[in-house]
Image (cartoon, grey):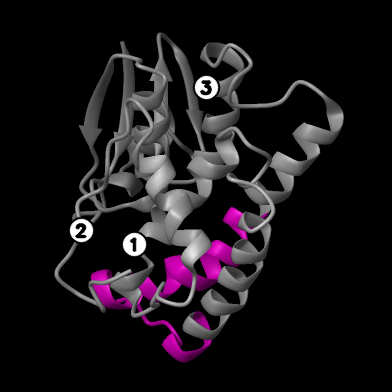
Amino acid sequence: MIKLYGFPLSGHSHRVELMLSLLGLPTEFVQVDLKQGAHKAPEFIASINPFGQVPAIDDNGVVLADSNAILVYLANTYGNGQWLPSDPVGQARVQRWLSAAAGQLHAGPASARLATVFGAEVDTAVAIARSHALLKLVEAQLSQSRFLVGEQPTIADVAFYTYTAHAPEGNVSLADYPQVRAWLASIEALPGFVGMPRTAVGLQSQ
């Protein structure tokens, strides 16, 4: 059984939880209390993640951190070729979206949500503006294909799903993005889908 070290309201944790569920892998969720600084505890840093962050997994002794790196590992190990293309062009296209998930998605919807859900000191106007700039790009891509990289879901979609679905919690409305909303519905219809708890903040509408 794979151990997932995470926090229930962490979008980075959820993308790994979602991937594990989509793959049908038995998982033990080990909650790391971020509010109490458990992710910075010496034992966690020494044995789980020296960067002091969640998520991390322990797959029978294989300990890995960083949500996108974990997605790549899970797809290659358990995905049977479905979640990560084998050809160089397909892999590069997935990587482009993984980079955007670590960059623009983090600086936009994830940061805007950090301010409302966790009270982080964030320039919300800038984060919201970045969010809409990114969503316009995603909307354009999804007008050409059902998923971010073609007609089948990949780990790119998993990496982008959570913070996009929960963007309204950071006061980023999805009302002007019909293709994005349809894409979210397509992911939510996948066998094994599991959502992240929603919080009673933000616009509360897509």
Q: Which residues are magenta?
A: 100-127
Figure quadrant of the C terminus? bottom left
Residue that badge 2 annotates: 198
Mark 3 burial class by Cα count in 10 Å: few <14, some 14-19, many 20+: many
> What amino acid type should be assigned to the residue bearing mark 2?
Arg
Residue 80, quarter of the rendered image: top right
Mark 2 burial class by Cα count in 10 Å: few <14, some 14-19, many 20+: few
Q: Is residue 73 above or below residue 109?
A: above
Q: Nearer the viewer, mark 3 or mark 2?
A: 2
Q: Would residue 30 be found to the left or right of residue 103 on screen?
A: left
Q: Closer to the N terminus: mark 1 or mark 3?
A: 3
Q: Kindly check if marks 1 and 3 are in contact, taking CB atoms under 8 A apart as contact.
A: no
Residue 199, quarter of the rendered image: bottom left
**Residue 37 highlighted magenta (yes or no):** no
**Residue 120 highlighted magenta (yes or no):** yes
Give the Cα distance between marks 3 and 2: 26 Å
Give the Cα distance between marks 1 and 3: 24 Å
Residue that badge 3 annotates: 74
Task: Point out residue 25 in the picture as x, y percentages from the top left corner.
Answer: 35, 15
Q: Residue at x 58, y 34 (%)?
A: 154
Task: Point out residue 38 in the picture as x, y percentages from the top left corner.
Answer: 25, 46
Q: Closer to the N terminus: mark 1 or mark 2?
A: 1
Q: Residue at x 55, y 35 (%)?
A: 153
Q: Main secondary structure of the magenta part?
A: helix
> What amino acid type should be assigned to the residue bearing mark 3?
Leu
